Amino acid sequence: MSEKSEGAIRVASPNVHDATFVAWDGNELSMHAPRAYPPGARLEGTLDAHALRMKVHRCRRVEEGRFLVIGRPLDLRREAADHLATLARTSPESAVVPRW
């Protein structure tokens, strides 16, 4: 298995694809994904080997073939929350989830 970069999200359900961490504000998680998801959709996958479940709140196309997906993690374990907080501290933009 190849080494994944930090912030890599592997979505396994409902479709398998890779997404990229964008921001975490302590309540909501945002990521760039190759497809759109409707509000209320539930995603399951992993974030750098931490289990992650998420309910989508909103989604918007940011460029051709990339979508900004924002939602709330479900059943988030402390280790995963700590890892998200660490990723959010890497840059100032990572601590602010976009609003519209």
Image: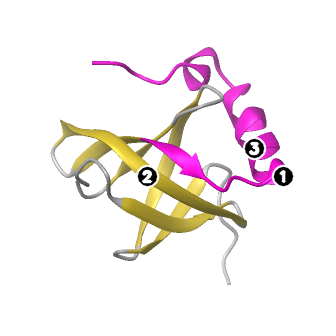
Q: Is residue 30 above or below residue 98?
A: below
Q: Are marks 3 and 1 in contact (CB under 8 Å)?
A: yes
Front residue (pair 19, 97):
97
Report the residue at 68% width, 51% height from top. 6
Report the residue at 78% width, 35% height from top. 86
Report the residue at 35% width, 19% height from top. 99
Secondary structure category for the residue under label 3: helix
Tag 3: amino acid: Ala
Tag 2: amino acid: Lys
Front residue (pair 80, 49):
80
Q: Picture quarter containing residue 53?
A: bottom right
- Residue 75 in picture, x, y percent from top left: 66, 56
Q: Picture quarter containing residue 14?
A: bottom left
Q: Quadrant of the N terminus?
A: bottom right
What is the number of the mark on residue 81? 3
Q: How many discs mark residues in the rendered view?
A: 3
Q: Which residue is mark 1?
A: 79
Q: Viewed as shown, does residue 37 lie left or right of 50?
A: left
State the CA–CA distance, disc 2 to disc 3. 16 Å
> What residue range appears in magenta?
71-100
Q: Quadrant of the C terminus?
A: top left
What is the number of the mark on residue 55? 2
Tag 1: amino acid: Glu
State the CA–CA distance, disc 3 to disc 1. 5 Å
Query: Which badge, 1 or 2, is on the more N-terminal residue?
Result: 2
Residue most extreme to the bottom = 1
State the CA–CA distance, disc 1 to disc 2. 19 Å
